Image (spheres, rainbow, N blue to C red):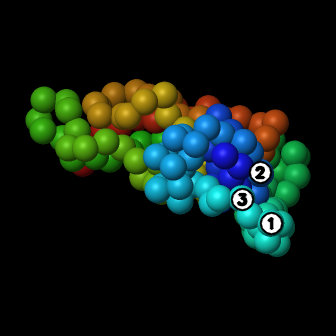
Amino acid sequence: MKIILTNEVSSLGEPGDVVEVKDGYARNYLLPRNLATPWTKGGEKQVEAIRAARATRAVKSLEEAEHQKSQLEGRAVKVKAATTGTGRLFGAVTSGEIAEAIVAAGGPQVDKRRIETAGHIKSLGDHTATVRLHPEVLATVKLQVVEA
């Protein structure tokens, strides 16, 4: 099935890309989560609109991305979370909470959709997250999850 990505999917591509996927993957995962729309003949206008919106949100240059990378990797970010008392969290730390903690620590504004973690962060302690600032630039952020 041919689809147009409306959000970034790490294994497929960027918003505005037209990709071919298996029917079940599109019907059961991408379309219900609004990560993609079915491709149609009139979809070229939609592709251009998505690409234009992505270009305005994206980091403009490689130099700016490198500068933001140096700002992010140079600081420790503390994320406060409610715990059960045994070191386990109520729920998990979200990418939105990580983005807010980066700004609170004096870092640059980061889009929460560009933050990736190795898995769900559900315990106190030190963790890492990766921020995709540019297609060629990845920044590793050290997170310290502490009790709220």
Q: Is residue 136 above or below residue 98?
A: above
Residue at horizontal 42 percent and vertical 42 percent from the top: 78
Inter-mark Cα distance, 1 to 3 = 7 Å
Compare residues 21 and 57 and report the one nearer the observer. Answer: 21
Mark 2: amino acid? Val
Q: Residue at x 68, y 52 (%)?
A: 3
30 relative to 44 in the view: left or right: left
- Seen from the viewer's position, the closer of residues 120 and 49 is 49
N-terminal of the pair, mark 1 or mark 2, is 2
Circle 2 residues within 10 Å: few <14, some 14–19, many ≥20? many
Question: Dot 3 lies on which element?
Answer: loop
Could you tell me if residue 28 is visible in this image? yes
Q: Which residue is mark 3?
A: 39
Taking the image as shown, residue 110 lies to the left or right of residue 89, namely right
Discs 1, 3 touching: Cβ within 8 Å: no
Give the CA separation, mark 2 to mark 3.
Answer: 8 Å
- Look at mark 2 in the image and give the residue it sits on: 18
**At 61% across and 56% down in the image, what residue appears?**
36
Can you tell which quarter of the image residue 146 is in? top left
- Mark 2 or mark 3: name the one nearer the start of the chain: 2
Q: Secondary structure at mark 2?
A: strand
**Helix, strand or loop status at disc 1:** loop
Q: Are marks 2 and 3 in contact (CB under 8 Å)?
A: yes
- Numbered badge on residue 41: 1
